[in-house]
Image (cartoon, coloured by chain):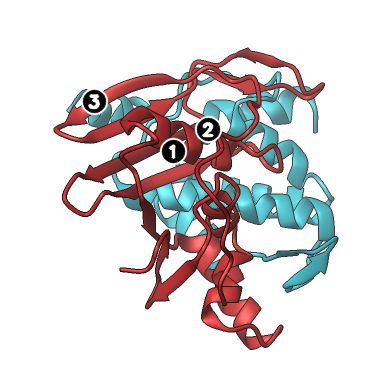
Amino acid sequence: MSIRVSGFNPVSSTGLTYTPESLGANILELTPRQKFNAEGNIVPEMGIRSEIVSTFNPEKEDLFINFYRTTESGRGVGTEMISNSIQGFGMQNVRSISAELGLTNKSVYEYNMSAEGMSPAQAASNTSPGKSMINPGYGQIEMNGLYIRSGPEN
Amino acid sequence: MACTLDLDRRTKLSASEKTTILRLLEKGKASDLLDLLLGDSPYHVTGEVEFASNDERDAYLMTIEHLRFVSKYGAQAGPIKENGRVYFAYPDYFERWFQLGTPGLTQEDLLSYLSGAA
């Protein structure tokens, strides 16, 4: 499956404000100390409801998502975190994004193949990280085991 | 190591309290338990959730997903497809969450809830 789009487009903001922290050379963590309350308003939050850690490989021009999680469901926070991480390293520098499918997304990925008859690329494109990689404009999902990659062909 | 000390101070749940939680789910109170874990419940009295290991963090996150499923679909096994999305129950991770001492939920939180809401 090939989904090609042109260029990076930052996704629309959910309104959350993220605090960046460098965890090492080319390793970036983003966390909002905020959450959505029951009414859908953004309020301060002591704990971490969402976070993403990513590593940029300047030689491969690849952004690897080491870890991301959010307990905010259906608000586009995951996509926003990936988009913000790309911007954190410079959208002109990042040519591809990659990650290993996490626990819930692995379930969805395997379901998409076994119950829906999708190819690995289609199945991955219909997981949250797959959509989050396609939405900013990287497209072209490839799978290698449970590793998902979006960007130009190597 | 400060994280570990904080966790040691936390009062973990007993076997009878596990039974209490399972009964709450049977009574349709999964969303109340979900709010307790997320810190959104007015009965949540413990501070910020901290994890001693990735295993604890994963069990906590998957229990949130499990409780979301149970609060919406009850005791069905799943998966359930709705509006183009597919939802799963995660009973194995829920059990693991108990084994790890219910990270994200303390005895104080549960007692607060039971004394005020249940």
Disc 3 vs disc 1: Cβ atoms closer than 8 Å?
A: no
Can you see residue B90? no
Q: Chain of mark 2?
A: B
- Which element carries disc 3, helix, strand or loop? strand
Same-chain check, marks 2 and 1: yes
Measuring from the top left, give residue B80's x and y in whole percent.
78, 70
Q: Earlier in the sequence, mark 2 or mark 1?
A: 1
Q: Which residue position holds label 2?
A: B107
Q: Residue A22's mark?
A: 3
Residue at the disc numbered 1: B12
Q: Colour of chain A?
A: red
At 70% from the left and 37% from the top, the residue drawn is A75
Counting from the top left corner in percent of width and height, residue B50 is at: 38, 31
Question: Which chain hosts label 3?
Answer: A
Q: Quadrant of residue A113?
A: bottom right
Closer to the camera, B72 or B109? Answer: B72
Amino acid carrying label 3: it is Ser
Per the model, the C-alpha gap separating discs 2 and 1 is 6 Å
Task: In the rendered view, tell whether residue B95 sits above or below residue A19.
Answer: below
Viewer-side residue, B44 vs A97: A97
Amino acid type for the residue under numbered disc 2 = Gln
Residue drawn at x 50%, y 42% is A8
Q: Do badges 2 and 3 share one subunit?
A: no
